[in-house]
Every structure is written in structure tokens, then in C-alpha cells.
Image (cartoon, rainbow, N blue to C red):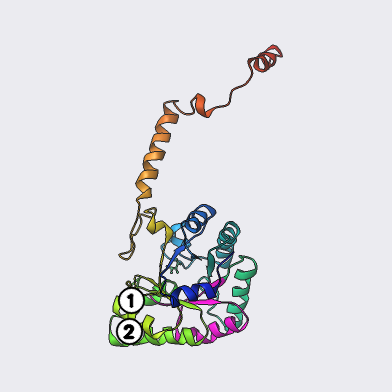
Amino acid sequence: MRLTIRDIQKMAADGIPIPMLTAYDATSARLSEAAGVPMLLVGDSLGMVIQGHTDPIPVTMEHIIYHCSIVTRVTDHAFVVGDLPFMSYNVSPEQALENAARLMQEGRANAVKLEGGEALAPTIARIVQAGIPVMGHVGLTPQSVYKLGGMRLQGKDVDSARQVLHDAQAVQAAGAFAIVLEAIPAPLAKLVSDKLAIPTIGIGAGPDCDGQVQVFHDLVGLFEDFVPRHAKPYVQLAPLIRDAVNQYVAEVEAKQFPDADHSFSMKPEILAALEAEGA
Ligand code: KIV
């Protein structure tokens, strides 16, 4: 049975750390769920790791809905959060509600995530009032990369750290069931986590959050364009894949692949009959 926000909140309340991962396709979603990941994020990081952009700005509702529908189709236990992409929720609370509803209906997401703090509280409240669970996201908010002047650590000085705390509190007060804290100093993430009742899920936010979220491709060493400092590749798949593809190319060029083990045979009389027909 699929987990719910109550299960996720109970894990945090019971002190059970929550390992969350991004997923965009059937294979990685199945592997992650089978490995015990309780919460999957169809994140707009797909703009970088799937689509090859340098930031998530070009990602659209259609893209997220497409990937979300795949991840929810092939999983039956993990709680699946769909990311609302750039400008799909910033125009008005009504626009946000309409797009959150699309992500639930067409993508079959179990909840939506959106970036922003105090300024987005009325939007979060509107979506939650309509019955859709919302995950907040404060600190480094990648959709604001151009305003922030890059993917930078947030909350480094008193004003900025206070703002991160206020943003997180506003997101909780608006009704979010959990919140991502991205790229903030570990002691600030601990302070925020101590002050909030909802689960905090960190990425580049140190060990004291209730859970962690990582981009799947970073975790398995598949994305080599840029490896963020907070990411830990548990395996380096990219060189393994390069080796495998190199071998394949060499074997095809040398006519060693496919060999008899990877080919299909035919009864000689069938071939003989064809040849007799002059085929
Ligand atoms: O899109 C994403 O993958 C995210 C995580 C980095 C939290 O928002």
C-alpha cells in the first residue's frame, strides 16, 4: 500500500530518518522503491539531468506530468511528490491550484512541491485548503537562480539566516506537510528543524534534518557535468557505462557481436525452401 503524509510525518515524529530520492523514469523509480526509499520526488532537476539544460527554468507542467505519471505507474509503496515547475504557481494562488490539481489528476502525484517562503504562504494555504498536500522548499530555491546570482549557499549572514527561518515557519503555518531545506549551513538547518513540527528534508543542509533528499543521478555517479559539494556518489556509473558502450562499439565493428548465443537460428529446411523458391 502506498505511504501517506501521515506515515512520512510519523517517521519524523518517531525519529526514523527519511531517505528521499528524485525519480524521473520507470527503471530508477522501481530500483529506488525496492531499496526502501519511502518518498520519491519527480523534481524539476530533470531539466538538468534528463533534458540537458543548465538550470530548471525550461521545465514545463507537461514535462513534470509526463515523468510523474511514469513514476506513479510503476510504484505502489513510495509516496510520490511532483515538483511544480517555474512560473506554474507564481502568477496567482488560483493558477497554482489549477496546476497542482493537474499534477495530481494527470501525473497522479500524491503531493506537490513548490519553492518559496513567506511570499508563497497564501498560495500554499490555497492549495492545501483544496485538499492537496504541499511540500515547501526554502533556502536555495533553484528556480530563482537568476535572482540569487547562482546556485549559492543561503542563510550565511544574520539577515539571510533569519529570513530562512521565517520562510520555513510561514510555510509550516500555511499548512505544508513537510519542507525541503536546500543549501543552508548545517547549524541553521538544525535550528529550523528544532523549531518546526513538520518534517524537514535536507539537501546540502547537514545531518540534523528529519530526512535527506538527493538527485538520483548524483547518487549513482551518472551526471558528470557538475557534482555539487553536498552530493556523495555511492557508485560511479558513468565510467562503467562508458566502458560497456566502448566494448559494444568495438565488438560490432569487429563483427564479434552478436555471436551465436545472442542470435536466433532457423530450421535448415525452412531456409532451403526459401532458397528453392528463388527468394
Ligand atoms: O528538483 C529537485 O530535484 C529538487 C531537489 C533538489 C530538492 O527540488
Any part of residue 52 in sight:
no
Q: In the rendered image, which quarter is residue 253 located in?
A: top left
Q: Earlier in the sequence, mark 2 or mark 1?
A: 2
Residue type at the position of mark 1: Ile
Of the numbered discs in the image, which one, if any, rests on residue 241?
none
Query: 45 left or right of 102?
Result: left
Task: Using the image as rendered, state which of residue 244 and residue 80 is in the foreground.
Answer: 80
For the point 49% across and 28% down, the residue is: 258
Q: Residues within 10 Å of mark 2 (few under 14, many from 20)?
A: some
Name the residue that disc number 1 marks. 184
Mark 1 lies on a secondary structure that is loop
Count of all numbered marks drawn on residues in the image: 2
Q: Residue furthest front?
A: 14
> Per the image, is 133 magenta?
yes
For the point 38% across and 58% down, the residue is: 219
Q: In the rendered image, which quarter is residue 6 located in?
A: bottom right
* Residue 51 in picture, x, y percent from top left: 48, 57
* Residue 22 in picture, x, y percent from top left: 46, 62
Q: Residue furthest top?
A: 276
| Magenta stretch, residue numbers | 111-140
